[in-house]
Amino acid sequence: MTSPDSPPTRPWRYVLGYSRRDFLSAVGVSGGAGALFATMGALGLAPTAEASAKGAFDPPQPSDFSLTGRSAKKVVILGAGVAGLATAYELGKAGYDCTVLEALDRVGGRNWTIRGGDRVTELDGSTQVARFRDGVYLNAGPARLAQWMITVDYCRELGVDLEVFTNSNAQAYIYHQGMQAPVRWRTAKADVYGHVSELLSRATDAGALDGALTAQDKERLIAFLSSFGAVGNKASGFKYTGSSRRGYSVNPGAGEQPGTVLGPVPSLSEVLSSGVGQRFAFEFGYDQAMLMFQPVGGMDQVPRALADRIGRQRIKLRSAVTKITDLPDGVEVEYKDRHGRTQKIKADMCVAAMPPHLLAKTPHNLGAELQTALATPTVTNSGKIGLEYRRRWWETDEDIYGGITSTDLDLATIWYPSYGYGSSRGLVVGYYNFGAQADAYAALKHADRERRAVEQGMLIHGAKYRDELASSVSIAWKLQPYIEGAWVGWPSRQGAYQLLNKPAGHVYFAGDWLSHMIAWQSGALESARKVVTELHQRVLSTS
Amino acid sequence: MTSPDSPPTRPWRYVLGYSRRDFLSAVGVSGGAGALFATMGALGLAPTAEASAKGAFDPPQPSDFSLTGRSAKKVVILGAGVAGLATAYELGKAGYDCTVLEALDRVGGRNWTIRGGDRVTELDGSTQVARFRDGVYLNAGPARLAQWMITVDYCRELGVDLEVFTNSNAQAYIYHQGMQAPVRWRTAKADVYGHVSELLSRATDAGALDGALTAQDKERLIAFLSSFGAVGNKASGFKYTGSSRRGYSVNPGAGEQPGTVLGPVPSLSEVLSSGVGQRFAFEFGYDQAMLMFQPVGGMDQVPRALADRIGRQRIKLRSAVTKITDLPDGVEVEYKDRHGRTQKIKADMCVAAMPPHLLAKTPHNLGAELQTALATPTVTNSGKIGLEYRRRWWETDEDIYGGITSTDLDLATIWYPSYGYGSSRGLVVGYYNFGAQADAYAALKHADRERRAVEQGMLIHGAKYRDELASSVSIAWKLQPYIEGAWVGWPSRQGAYQLLNKPAGHVYFAGDWLSHMIAWQSGALESARKVVTELHQRVLSTS
């Protein structure tokens, strides 16, 4: 997600002017919070928590037709990924006659939860069969939801239970090549924040920033740094000498066991050269900051619930679209059914919710400009391996319950599971990477992917990372039939992107690739809502 | 927990020297991670992740007696809080004949989960009856576990399932009196880190820190600050102008909706005067940093599971200790049973796992020095109110799924529930405070506590905080019979603390108050393990 330069839409400030604040504070003291609130209300200052930043959406209703005398239309939807399913689900609320064509033998598209017995077949025909024990799964595609995303609302509406997805954990590690040992996030933060606070406190106190700070600013800044960095006082030169935030080598205990704080403390130069601080921004991201969530039991609870609401009989699996023809009064779609026979389906409207690079390979009569547009976005690969372990050594041996270890190895990240804490087996994501790193793994056969992931993981976790392994499954999204990529990027949001965000005759396009939340399910859902709204408005206004 | 000055016990550094790092890096490039690992192993450098920092504990075993010919002894345990229960549980593993006396009509002590139908009676006899719906509960006492605490191991051993306790959430608020509106944690962090990074980048680039930094340090520091603060480049004067990390007033969506970043950005002075940055250190604490956990279904799953393993028949509820007499060959304890009759129990050993200030009120023959020791720690009060709401407006209206809002009001903190996401009702902790703030609420009747908590909460959440309320229950720990406080503090860890950490005749003392993790269940558990180990060793060596 980019940071647009749009002008701010709402006035917002941390603080009132001092005189007003002092006044209110005095009211608060004498009259209690109730009086304070009443006074602020009288001044037009009553604070309100931010409302949700979500856009409005009114799903189509049966009454839209019964009130207007118009009738619901027939819609064919190409692809049973999240965008396609959400389209059918929302249109279905008003009684649209939807048919979903899906090339794979399952719904969900990239939203795929792999469990024991599932087969992972790649474009070259090579196949893995997952041997995971009951209750162990790999979310091969999307795996996390931010609270503000509408995916969370769909979970509520669909009755899909949520639990925390452990996107960051102070107990997990940062590992950069050349380190003597991995460092826990909590330790890295303590040291970076400590040294930076020492440095800035000294500079501030020495007057080096007097041009930018008032005397009061300076005092407040030094007070902040003292707490933020756990640094010493002025007499000690604001020295950072470590703190219990680093962690302990021996935990505090009972009686005469105060614990032993982890040491020694690296120097500022060592901390800077380690590069650990470069990792911290990840968890500040609007889309990545904790708390994050996941459906209980696997991410595919979302598409499964959507499919159940749509009605499974409306979803034709193993039905690969072979031709799209826009007609004067509707649209015709040809597809190969599960028996290899070509079938045709005619509808009033079509919503193409397939990846753009696959639509670009599908014959159609929508014109050359549209074809060029479909071929415009660039495809990115990503990959994961699920390593099932016989025991949860990360919990029992290293006190890590969930979270992500970040590395500069080409495995990129190691994820500890966000479910099944304290149980026997568990699944670690041995790599989640993309781009060139994912391509490097994709070029290997599964056994070699596993070997490489395990060898690299041993750099962090030692021999148990190899010795306790029970089974594994890997995915390379660019090698998945009918998907062939993880997500796409647009060179620009002008031109092709704009064209595909409009219908071509009776054909609409939907998917995360037509949103500003690419690679997020919420992008697919937002796009589906947009297309549903536009299609429904058109039907109501023209039929 | 304090940060002891103990010398570090293990060498630890972020990075190797450059030449060695370069060498290893070169090996890594040519030979892959496997070769790198092998080479590091050969150099004696193979990194290993930190082992758990937990102390060792070998529970007593039946074979300890069968092998030595000695027999298990009779032990009376005073108090069925976490320390008392853990003592009985661990001794029971070796066949000790344990009896637990508990004054209340439930096990757990301060570990108390209040559900619909439960009664909360205070010292003056005033009683609340919880009216919470099924599935709604308040953890009135302890509510969170850090991963490294042995409480987590007990949960594994006892089959108590864990889920994430949402101790911090970027979507929750910071609210200080005088603010025009509460500010989300994510926004506060973006602004503080942004302005601090701008300030430090400029000072570094201007040479103000040249005495402390090498040229390479400077370059690395500026690179770190660029990412950490999302500030502009050198040409822009490293300016912080806000970023998507602040959040959005309109979320990014589909089509032509890139989203609107929240604005405007406050100035450095405004941010400093708001004091929001003073809140950040909370989540760096060894005992508070996320991820934190809670038992599924309520914290009392821990004492309940312990009681089940001990055998409920060994636990005498409503049995208040009235006298402790150490004898030449054992110990005698008098108590009032549920019918008000005085009973006596004789045992070989006693473990007093009651609060020290209540032990100090109990007649005993353990001597004046011990009596003085029991009266030494100071008692701290704490309080909570559970506000049950008819709908989960914090989720539906404000996109807050769990976490804690921090304030400078005397409610201190508001906690959003870590369970039942997306369901209908939910329970918000309307205050969790201690010391003088808790005393202020304790001085009120329940109805007035509720009124005050709601009035203050409206400053953050507006009228729905009052209008959607369904029911509430409050607790003031200093007013709870047979508990009379939240936790204690020691003026020193010398003298009284040391005395009580040794047995007085046949009487041992156990509790979080005899640990370096006061107010944490893990302190109680560590203390129980210590006493169990010492008592068992004495029995094995002397009987």
Image: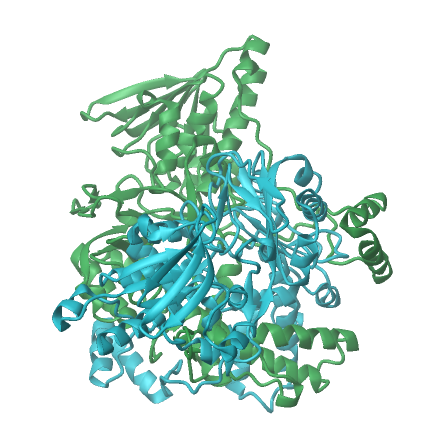
Chain colours: A green, B cyan
Out of A384 and B186, give the one closest to the viewer: B186
Counting from the top left corner in percent of width and height, residue B258 is at 58, 45
A504 left or right, relative to A24: left
A384 left or right, relative to B215: left
Residue at x 18%, y 41% (from the top left corner): A117
Residue A451 visible in the current orientation: yes
- Relative height, residue B199 to residue A13 (above, below): below
Counting from the top left corner in percent of width and height, residue B482 is at 52, 56
Q: Going by the picture, which residue comes out furthest to the bottom?
A: B211
Q: Going by the picture, which residue comes out furthest to the top?
A: A69
B456 left or right, relative to A525: right
Residue B83 visible in the current orientation: no
Out of A389 and B332, give the one closest to the viewer: B332
Q: Quadrant of the C terminus of chain B?
A: bottom left
Q: How many marks?
A: 0
Out of B379 and A525, give the one closest to the viewer: B379
Residue at x 32%, y 69% (from the top left corner): B532
Counting from the top left corner in percent of width and height, residue B373 is at 52, 76
Q: Quadrant of residue A258?
A: bottom left
Counting from the top left corner in percent of width and height, residue B367 is at 48, 77
Out of B201 and A324, give the one closest to the viewer: B201
- Relative height, residue B325 to residue B110 (above, below): below
